Image (cartoon, helix red, strand yellow):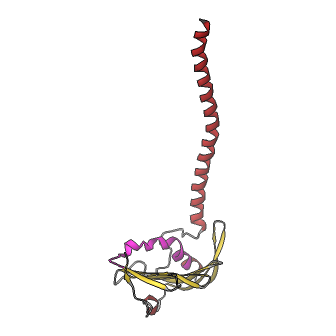
Amino acid sequence: MERERTGPVRRVLTTAALSLIGVMLALPILLIASTMLVLESRLAANAGSAMGAPAQAAEYARSFSMTVSEPDRTVRLWLENMEGQPNFRQTIEVDGQPVSEQLYLSEEQTLYTAEANADSELAWTMVEGVTPEQMQFSRLATGPAAWALEYGVGDHQVPVQGGSFDITVHSVDEDIPAEVFELPPDAAPVPAE
């Protein structure tokens, strides 16, 4: 009879002990995870300022052209009249070969894109009815447009978390030649699907 009374008590104590062990094992993991989340958010905030984000939102070039160089990739950017009727072009080359292009013409409200196909030729598509707001050019204000104004014309190294990369600023708040914002003569854009 005493054995029958100690059985339920023993089960309750065993369950409580196992629950306590589980909490003791899980608590350090939860503390480490929450610490990592806090550190990641602080690093992300610091990275934004380390990437050359301007002190005030108004400190960026409204028009610029630049080249961003990485060991195996080159990105060329042109942007004019960011706050009015913007025109934008971006080209990306990998190991010297063009792999993609974007061209936005505000007057047409059209985004042209090109991607390298299997033959390494650029195949052009277009999307009409794209507004400048949909293009979100304001995101460039805390990166390339801010760097253009901060560093000015010339070759520079931009510090980023984990290193730096090279940029060449070609122009800041100057007119960009109209031919930059023209489709190549052999481009035959088709509507994007």
Could you tell whether 58 is left or right of 161 in the image?
left
Percent across and percent down for residue 18 are 62, 28
Nearer-the-camera pick, 85 or 151: 85
Nearer-the-camera pick, 25 or 132: 25
Percent across and percent down for residue 191 are 35, 80
Question: Above or below — where is 176 with respect to 84?
Answer: below
In the picture as drawn, the residue positioned furthest to the left comes out as 129
Question: Above or below — where is 167 with respect to 44?
Answer: below
Magenta residues, as a range? 127-148
Question: Is residue 137 within the magenta segment?
Answer: yes
Percent across and percent down for residue 178 are 43, 92
Percent across and percent down for residue 168 are 60, 83
Could you tell whether 124 is left or right of 93 in the image?
left
Q: Could one spot residue 80 in this view of the protein? A: no
What residue is drawn where x is 63% and y is 45%?
32
Question: Above or below — where is 174 with respect to 71?
Answer: below
In the picture as drawn, the residue positioned furthest to the front comes out as 118
Nearer-the-camera pick, 151 or 109: 109
